[in-house]
Amino acid sequence: MNPDDQNLKSGLRDGDQEVFKHLFMLYSPGLIRYGTSITHDTETTKELVQDLFLELWEKRQSLHITGSIKPYLYSSVYHKSLNWIRSQKIKDIYISNPVEIRNWFASPINQDKFDPMLLGIIEQQIRQLPDQCREVFTRSAIFGEKINDIASYLGLAPKTIENHLSRAKKILQKKLKNFR
């Protein structure tokens, strides 16, 4: 880590707006290019990068960047981009197959299949699943991976993957049961 990086981090932590502006001007063009290579959507990536810098500013006093700022920012954009892609896949699955997703609900729902509120609630509940359940559910329901492929990738038994998938669906059904 170079000394300039340390000055940028301490300036950011101290709330120096010039340092923040410098960080934004220095890194945002590259972050947008990098994020766009993942999302294939420049406008969305611009929003993701703006969100990242907003979070950086809001959490500046509690932020603990152990290494250099640049890899931290690129890693953050990478994860934000993947989360956006997962979110889009959830929406695409819901729009193309609302019947399957409606089966997650304990009671019948009469919502328009393009209801953004419902999509938001589903996304939020998926994000709140336990880590392993979320990983298995996302790979299976959203990315369409087979149970044996997930088991191989995660180094788990196929039966364990089935259990995680069943647990995730039960949790989602319970959480979404009152949505009508």
Image (cartoon, rainbow, N blue to C red):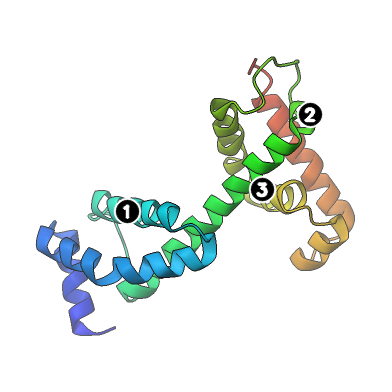
Disc 1 secondary structure class = helix
Q: Nearer the viewer, mark 3 or mark 1?
A: 1
Disc number at residue 180? none
Please tell me whether residue 42 is drawn above or below residue 168 in the rendered image: below
What residue does disc 3 label?
134
Q: Is residue 123 left or right of residue 49?
A: right
Asked if one can make out residue 66 in the rendered structure from this viewpoint, the answer is no
Q: Callout 2: helix, strand or loop?
A: helix
Q: Any mark on residue 50, and which?
A: 1
Q: Position of residue 118 (x, y in %)?
A: 59, 27
Judge whether 45 appears above or below 162 on screen: below
Q: Is residue 4 left or right of residue 47?
A: left
- Residue marked by disc 2: 99
Earlier-in-chain disc, 3 versus 1: 1
Mark earlier in primary sequence (1, 2) = 1
Residue type at tag 3:
Arg
Q: Of the residues shown, which amino acid type is indicated by label 2? A: Val
User: Extreme bottom residue here?
Assistant: 2
Return the x and y of residue 174 as percentages of the image width and height. 70, 25
Q: Which residue lies at the image location 75% right of the left edge and 15% below the top edge?
A: 107
Q: Label 3 vs label 1: CA separation?
A: 27 Å
Q: Residue at x 73, y 40 (%)?
A: 168
Q: Distance between the Cα atoms at labels 2 and 3? A: 21 Å
Q: Secondary structure at mark 3?
A: helix
Q: Are marks 1 and 2 in contact (CB under 8 Å)?
A: no
The amino acid on which the numbered mark 1 sits, given as a three-letter code, is Gln
Task: Using the rendered view, name the quadrant where residue 95 is placed.
Answer: top right
